[in-house]
Image: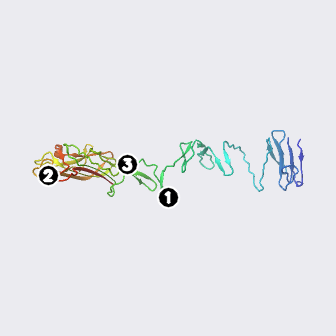
Amino acid sequence: MANINVNLNSYAAEEGRFDLVNTKVGLMIDGLVAAPNTLVANPFTALINGGAGPTTSSYAPVGPGTYTVVTSSQTQNRVIVLPDISDVLITKNSVDILTNKTLISNTDNVTARALWSGGTSPSVLPTNTINVSNSANPTADQVLTATNSTTATWQNPTASGLYSGGPTNPNIVVVNLATSPSSGQVLTATSATNATWQTPGSGSATLINSAYACSNTTTSVAAQGFFTFNDVPAAVGLNITPPTPGGTTFTINMAGTYKFEFQARGTPQTLTPPTPIVLRLLNGVTPVANSQYASDSQTTSLAAFPNGTELCVGFGYATFAAGATVQLQNWTAAGGGSVSLNSIPLGGDATINASLLFTQLM
């Protein structure tokens, strides 16, 4: 049987029931705190002492004909402290388990090994767990980035868009759908929110890339042969690759429209009557349209090499595909005559006797 001590100091007008099983209870209406017979003002307090059984209960009066059951399975002294404020205790008819979680109360931080993702609304809990426990410590400015649907690591951010229209409320221009650029392409807006890499259009003529090569040595170019260039300055830009010294071939690295300019001064194979020197450009094995030019023969005979010379000059525009290979060809006598080049004309100083220049236009 239970031992019950009751002080009815403010209980005279109350009705209630006390039915305590296997426990020893000191109960006071109008205050019992810390130890029996210690009186404090007003609050109703029930002190439950652990009994012999695994579970002890007390019944506290709450109104006529009703009672509240307090159940405990404690094995040591336990204290529940109610704050000195008016409040409502909310009960929950479920059991929630926290596993491997740390709550740091003084900073309100939570240490977690994983994140949840996949919730469709505030009332629908996410179902996918994203593991972040294997991620190395981040460095400055890194962001937590998904590596697949269930893991994430700290990574340096990469841009998938550009901001435009700032400084306040800038517009995001998406560029992550653009294919990888090729040499010489520029990022071009296709709408107010998208941009792609594109080859510059053919607006006003603007020098953006050029390559030049020349010859200043005494040599001979065979019939249908190609001019070699021993002096090759560095190209401007990357879209045209000139020949290596002693080579013949220019390589077009970016599709587009190019201006070409060439000249050669030499002695044709046939002197009487002199055969005009004829030059043209070849793209691979195909003659470049409108690139064939001839010298002007104004005499009935021409002095032999190295004294007699003719000058052939040509220029124009041509469109080339990326990867095109272009050479300056000797087409004198419809491809049947050679041309000799002298670096020092009669009575003069050493000069350029052949050259070719390409300039890209946009």
What element does badge 1 sit on?
loop
Q: Which residue is mark 1?
A: 170
- Between residue 246 and residue 349, name the one nearer to us: 349
61 displayed left or right of 137: right
Q: Is residue 197 visible?
A: yes
Report if the CB atoms under discs 3 and 2 are less than 8 Å apart: no
CA neighbours of label 1 inside 10 A, class few (<14), some (14 to 19), many (20+): few
SS of the residue at dot 3?
loop
The dot on residue 237 is none
Q: Name the image colouring.
A: rainbow
**Residue 170 place in picture, x, y as percent:** 50, 58
Which residue bears the numbered disc 3? 183
- Residue furthest bottom as drawn: 168
Q: Quadrant location of residue 78?
A: top right
The one nearer the camera, 250 or 37, is 250
Amino acid type at image mark 1: Pro
**Residue position for label 2:** 297
Residue 17 visible in the displayed image: no
Distance CA(mark 3)–CA(mark 2): 44 Å
Tell me the quarter of the picture where residue 96 sits. Answer: top right
The percent position of residue 184, horizontal first and vertical second, equals: 37, 50
Secondary-structure class at tag 2: loop
Q: Is residue 116 left or right of residue 194?
A: right
CB under 8 Å between discs 2 and 1: no
Q: Tell me which amino acid carries mark 2.
A: Ser
